[in-house]
Amino acid sequence: MVSLESRGIRLRIMTYGAIIASLDVPDGAGNFGDVVLGFDNLESYVRESAPYFGAVIGRYANRIAGGEFELNGVRHQVTRNAGTSCLHGGANGFDKAVWKIESSEENSVRLIHDSPDGDEGFPGALRARVTYTLVDNRLTVDYEAMTTVPTVVNLTQHSYWNLAGAGRGDVLSHGLMVAASHYLPMNDTLIVTGEIRPVQETPFDFRAPTRIGDRIDLSDDQLHIGQGYDHNLVLDRADHDLIRAALLQDTASGRILEVFTTEPGVQLYTGNYLDGSIIGKNGAAYGRHAGLCLETQHFPNSPNMPYFPSTVLSPDETFRSRTVFAFSAI
């Protein structure tokens, strides 16, 4: 376990899964609280790995339809661990790897993971790095990856946020803004259809701050398929620069989270499958909507959608991505 601290904000990182195990930030009154869901011990993370609490996801975040894709004329079959699809890199993705600490400084830690050629069926030996840097009120997550042969890569951070504090009720009263004019609808197997649909006049319009609970139970076919929000929102961007993608606010505590990213999309997942059976930190039972994820990433099933932003990485390239989580309170 590695701890970083800045202005009283304290971050704890595990080498298992490169997991954000805890993140204590102040509320409007200056009281600190842990705002990410998780467990009190390593054994629970290993045993209860399905929710991906706090983990770095790879090689490929989100779903690949049929667990297969074609690259340079070669068909690749990867692990099908979610029905007929590959989810979050397969049965033993990066969330279950023991990462190595490559370097550690006062305000940052860099972890490295070497994924062998053929790991979960993915081509190429891939070296992945993630660097967590905590300065002032900003947690910066930098990703880097290099491969020996062409492959596909999509990395993200899978923390479940509850700005009221982990285990302190649900997030339905949280206000959310996402800079996205479009989203990706899914079919009934949770695979994106390929359509890029406008959010206007749908429950997926978060261009103005909106309470999560205001529309989550509306009669909408997409909300029914996802059992809530579990959709990729297409960020409004003109280039690959860092932009503010989202703002999350809990009025009761006054805590605010701003998310900046270089990625083209963000997966909004509202903890729809949490059902109270998972006992998290301090003995809290995590019920439905106990936390939400804002997974900055490339689009789901991009290897099979040539008009989506490419996730192909070649040996002569280095994959780089940055996401910043900025905290404040009122």
Image (tube, helix red, strand yellow):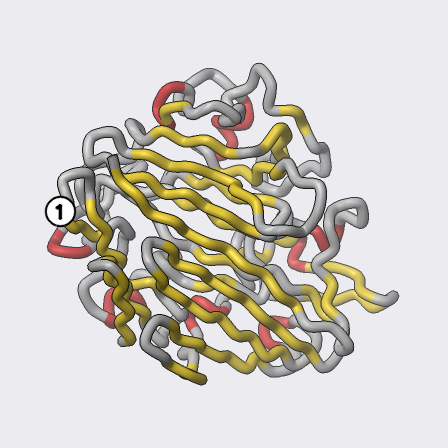
- For the N terminus, the image quarter is bottom left
Left or right relative to 50: residue 90: right
SS category of the residue bearing label 1? loop
- Residue 65 position, x and y percent, is 66, 51
Left or right relative to 131: residue 105: left
Left or right relative to 296: residue 258: left
**Vertical comparison of 95 with 225: above or below:** below
Residue occupied by mark 1: 31
Label 1 crowd (10 A; few <14 / some 14-19 / many >=20): few
Q: Nearer the viewer, residue 6 or 307?
A: 6
Image quadrant of residue 307? top right
**Which residue appears at 40% of the width and 70% of the height?**
17
**Which residue appears at 41% of the width and 31% of the height?**
176
Left or right relative to 73: residue 36: left
**Which residue appears at 41% of the width and 51% of the height?**
325
- For the C terminus, the image quarter is top left
**Residue 80 in view, yes or no:** no
**Which residue appears at 26% of the width and 72% of the height?**
3
Instruction: Give the amino acid at mark 1.
Output: Asn
Q: Nearer the viewer, residue 30 or 70?
A: 30
- Residue 37 position, x and y percent, is 27, 52
Task: Find the residue positioned furthest to the right.
Answer: 73
- Residue 20 position, x and y percent, is 33, 63
